[in-house]
Amino acid sequence: MRVVVHRRAARYVQRLPSQEKKRVVAALEELATDPLNRPGVKAMLGQWSGFHRLRVGGTRIIFTVVAEKDVVSVDHIGPRGDVYK
C-alpha cells in the first residue's frame, strides 16, 4: 500500500525532535505493509468512525484505509491530548 500524509501532519512531524521523528517515520513506513493488523492500531468510534489510530509513545497517528485505491491516508498526527479535538 501507499501511504499519503496530509500536509499539516507532515509539518508536525518535521517539528518533532529527531528521536521522536525517527519513531513516527518508522511507524508510517510500517503502515504500508498491513495497516489494520498492526499492534496498537484501533478503530475509532463516534465522530471519528471510519478512522483508525496508531499510538507511537505520546503521539497519535490518525488514518483511514482506502482499499480500492490501495492507499493509507494519514489525516492527523499530533500529541495525544490535542489530536482528537
Image (cartoon, rainbow, N blue to C red):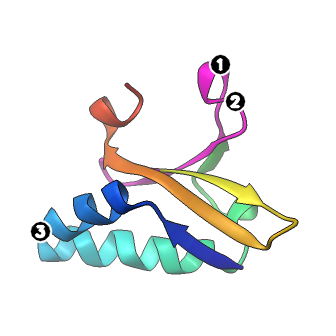
Does the image show residue 20? yes
Give the residue drawn at x 78%, y 73%: 70
Tell me the CA gap for discs 3 and 2. 31 Å
Magenta range: 43-61
Q: Is residue 51 magenta?
A: yes
Task: From the viewer's side, name the closer residue of 70 and 21.
Answer: 70
Tell me the CA gap for discs 1 and 2. 5 Å
Do callouts 1 and 2 mark residues in contact (Cβ within 8 Å)? yes
Tell me the CA gap for discs 3 and 1. 32 Å
Residue behind mark 2: 49
**Picture coordinates of residue 63 (x, y %)?**
58, 52
Dot 2 lies on which element? Answer: loop
**Picture coordinates of residue 59 (x, y %)?**
33, 50
Does the image show residue 16? no
The quarter holding residue 81 reads top left
Give the residue drawn at x 57%, y 78%: 30
Pointer 1 local density, CA inside 10 Å: few below 14, some 14–19, many at least 20: few
**Picture coordinates of residue 38 (x, y %)?**
66, 64
Q: Which mark is residue 17?
A: 3
Give the residue drawn at x 72%, y 79%: 1
Task: From the viewer's side, name the closer residue of 8 and 24.
Answer: 8
Residue behind mark 1: 46
The amino acid sitting under disc 1 is Gly
